[in-house]
């Protein structure tokens, strides 16, 4: 391999990492759940592919923009100091160009092959995350996750809008589930990365209010999450199958949150954080399976 090809390959890998592919995969998964719940008809697979691609590209653009804006703080944190920008393997100008490219192409795909409502909602989500949350909320208030969580809760709404060109109450319920899930998920991370956030000067809840208060907040928000996950039953678009799954998942979440509250440790905070990612994936998968079981009856 020539030196030019090697440099190009390394640059491509760095840009790929800049887009936070694992986070984007979860975003696209949640959006796809919204699509399949909205219109249980795989015959519209072309729209689903276009919507997934467009939403994924804009999400990658938002992640890259986040890395550009936070490159100096990322260099101070153990969790993020190995990212391409703090390491200097690519320039912030190239990263910004990559962010703009992904975002513009994604929005064009949504406008051309999906619908303008989804395009505008996705653009609003991009701005809410990369500008409002990253630039304004995150460095200024310990409620950054609570308020900024609205951007992260949008994927199923985007998916629903992609298939129906509307945002009905069912889509709002999916939004509320992720919105309620976000604070305990991120506060668990902030607990075992407390030194990182303190060093970077970010007012995360454990930094401003202390670890005991944060553990209590996680425990209380876990109950809010558990109650919110019952809303699909209240609206009648899920049944006993989803109920069984969500009871098991909520038991696991509440048990870990209680253990963290009573016996604080970085290991328990990390365990809750990791479980919360699987929790969300399994919860939406259960909702989807339940929905299709009802249709096939």
Image: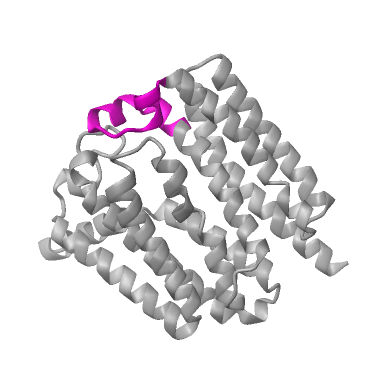
* Residue 24 left/right relative to 166: left
- Looking at the rendering, in which quadrant would you find the N terminus? bottom left
Q: Quadrant of residue 258?
A: top right
Residue 245 x, y percent position in the rendering: 75, 44
Q: Tell me the chief SS of the magenta region.
A: helix
* Residue 253 left/right relative to 213: right
**In the rendered structure, does residue 90 fall within the stretch colored magenta?**
no
* Residue 156 left/right relative to 41: left
Q: Residue at x 60, y 76 (%)?
A: 163
Q: Quadrant of residue 92?
A: bottom left
Q: Residue at x 64, y 53 (%)?
A: 284
**In the rendered structure, does residue 200 fall within the stretch colored magenta?**
yes
Write down the region rendered in magenta: 188-210
Residue 246 x, y percent position in the rendering: 72, 43
* Residue at the bottom extreme of this rendering: 112
Q: Residue at x 27, y 50 (%)?
A: 135
Residue 152 lies, with reference to residue 12, above or below; the image says above
Observer-nearest of 32 and 202: 202
Can the viewer see residue 47?
A: yes
* Residue at the right extreme of this rendering: 297
Can the viewer see residue 19?
A: no
Residue 164 x, y percent position in the rendering: 62, 77
* Residue at the left extreme of this rendering: 3
């Amino acid at each position: 391999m020539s030196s030019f090809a090697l440099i190009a390959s390394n640059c491509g890998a760095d840009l790929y990492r800049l887009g936070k592919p694992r986070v984007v995969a979860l975003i696209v998964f949640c959006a796809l759940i919204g699509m399949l719940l909205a219109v249980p008809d795989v015959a519209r697979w072309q729209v689903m592919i276009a919507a997934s691609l467009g939403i994924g590209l804009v999400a990658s653009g938002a992640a890259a923009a986040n890395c550009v804006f936070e490159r100096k703080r990322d260099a101070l944190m153990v969790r993020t100091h190995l990212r391409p920008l703090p390491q200097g393997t690519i320039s912030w100008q190239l990263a910004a160009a990559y962010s703009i490219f992904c975002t513009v192409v994604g929005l064009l795909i949504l406008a051309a092959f999906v619908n303008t409502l989804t395009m505008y909602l996705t653009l609003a989500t991009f701005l809410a995350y990369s500008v409002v949350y990253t630039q304004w909320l995150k460095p200024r208030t310990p409620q950054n996750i609570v308020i900024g969580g609205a951007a992260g809760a949008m994927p199923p709404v985007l998916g629903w809008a992609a298939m129906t060109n509307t945002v009905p109450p069912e889509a709002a319920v999916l939004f509320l589930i992720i919105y309620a899930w976000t604070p305990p998920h991120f506060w668990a991370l902030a607990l075992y990365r407390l030194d990182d956030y303190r060093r970077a000067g970010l007012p995360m809840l454990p930094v401003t209010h202390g670890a005991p208060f944060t553990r209590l907040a996680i425990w209380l928000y876990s109950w809010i999450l558990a109650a919110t996950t019952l809303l699909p039953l209240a609206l009648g678009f899920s049944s006993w199958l989803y109920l069984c799954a969500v009871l098991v998942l909520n038991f696991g979440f509440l048990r870990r949150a209680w253990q963290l509250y009573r016996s604080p440790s970085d290991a328990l905070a990390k365990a809750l954080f990791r479980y919360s990612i699987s929790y969300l994936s399994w919860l939406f998968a259960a909702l989807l399976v339940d929905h299709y079981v009802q249709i096939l009856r």
